[in-house]
Amino acid sequence: MIHLTLARMSEALHGELHLAGGDTPDTIVSGAVDTDSRLIEAGGVFVAKPGETTDGHRFVGAAVERGAAVAIVEHVVDDAVSQIVVADVVAALADLARLVVADVRTRGSLRIVGITGSNGKTTTKNLLARILEGEGETVSPKASFNNEVGAPLTMLRVTDDTRFLVSEFGASAPGEIARLAGLVKPDIGVVLMVGMAHAGGFGGIEATFAAKSELVRALRPGGIAVLNADDSRVAAMAPIAAEQGCSVVWFGRGDAAEVRGDEVVVSASGTTCRVTVAGETLPLRLRVLGEHHVMNALAAIAAATALGVPLADCIERLETIDIAERWRMQPLGSDRVRIINDAYNASPDSMAAALRTLAQITGPDERMVAVLGAMSELGEFSGEEHDRVAELAVRLRIPRIVVVGADARRLFISAIGQGSWDDEAVFFASADEAYDYLLSELRDGDRVLVKSSNAAGLRFLGDRLGESFS
Ligand SMILES: Nc1ncnc2c1ncn2[C@@H]1O[C@H](COP(=O)(O)OP(=O)(O)OP(=O)(O)O)[C@@H](O)[C@H]1O
Ligand SMILES: [Mg+2]
């Protein structure tokens, strides 16, 4: 939320102020900022963002009807409201976020945590936010708001009462994390893992390493890098932290970690482990499905304990969470036919983690079914990574592999090539055809994983199956 004069806003945004309706440069704007005119509240700031499908400038009138006090635009649209005309509204949004967060920091006790990594950002953000909410007002992104628009919009929600801002930083291009994290200079930066997710846009894992390490470079001096001790690429960021005058807190499952998880036991009702921090060891019973979430929980605990939250409080709050986020390892269906909808997105690492989880939680008298769609954003690595998924599925002896969508056909062919029998691996061009097949095929005792990238849209197939078998 902002509380600024029009003059100061306009100056910070390098904009030109067009006054309307009796406003003066000293008029104070006090309200929330949004790019969606439908979400504007009285006194708010509407940011007219040119989009791919429509142009926010068309909705300035709608925002004014909802009570917008000022619009940030690239050209003057409407005389009914004061406007700040800027060259680029997305850059202006970033400038506004930088100003607002810096103002709040000088007055209040705001602490900022940034989270990045190829997988698990949203999950860890949710886990950490749940812990910090128990300490005081915490602002964190809705859903996966982590790009050049979502990240500043989230930052702009802080007020003088906010104690913690938890930001998720994704990267669709080199330099993006540097730019977004640089707006707020986090006190703590969490790097979860460096994997193949979105690697196509970068040209490989080394470039992904460079992009993720931008968060460590953006930390404020005296800050803390929370690093995965079990991921050698993340561990290689420690010298960068030192260069920044920052310390490192290690999390992981091995002995090198200061925030350590061990004795991990995975089941269909969640995952248990022991967590050790600074000589204190406590049991953790996570209801979130899948062994891979232990690392996300350890990362959240490492950040929270670095902010002074006692381990016992971290654990108590984590145990209240039953799902990381919709469509992430989301249990649906019933005890008879369990559906796990993990089709929000997919990368080679999250695909492997989901398949392993399926194998771990399926009992000896139960049957594994994997409903798999394409992994997108892998560029030149796409073919071999789909082959690898097929190899893993066959190695885990998944007796029914249902491949959906033309983009995933290679996975199907590869599964057959790896020795899956004809009727073990099946292919459907569309989710509707796969649904019809599964409706007649699934039976009591089936444990069904639904997994694909967002673009393949299998999350809706997962939802439909969940309803049909509930
Ligand atoms: N440590 C991990 N290793 C492998 N897979 C993981 C890990 N953590 C989470 N996942 C899986 O990755 C997928 C995405 O999880 P989540 O949404 O938390 O990640 P994200 O980094 O926010 O993704 P995005 O880049 O799409 O925003 C889910 O399927 C989740 O189960
Ligand atoms: Mg996310």
Image (tube, rainbow, N blue to C red):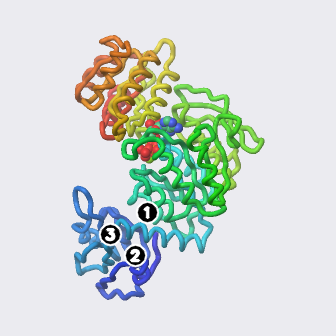
Q: Is residue 153 left or right of residue 187?
A: left
Residue type at mark 3 is: Asp
Q: State the image quarter where residue 246 is shown.
A: bottom right
Residue type at mark 1 is: Pro
Position of residue 463 relative to residue 180, above or below, is above
Q: Which mark is residue 88?
A: 3
The residue shown at (34%, 76%) is: 70
Numbered disc in front, either 3 or 1: 3
Which of the marked residues, 2 or 3, is nearer the chain's N terminus? 2
Query: Residue 39 placed where, x, y %?
Result: 34, 62
Q: Is residue 97 visible?
A: yes
Which of the marked residues, 2 or 1, is nearer the chain's N terminus? 2
Query: Residue 314 placed where, x, y %?
Result: 65, 46
Position of residue 354 relative to residue 81, above or below, is above
For mark 1, give the secondary structure: helix
The residue under label 1 is 152
Numbered disc in front, either 2 or 1: 2
Position of residue 244 relative to residue 273, above or below, is below
Q: State the image quarter where residue 447 is shown.
A: top left
The residue under label 2 is 13
For mark 3, give the secondary structure: loop
The residue shown at (23%, 81%) is: 79
Q: Residue furthest right?
A: 279
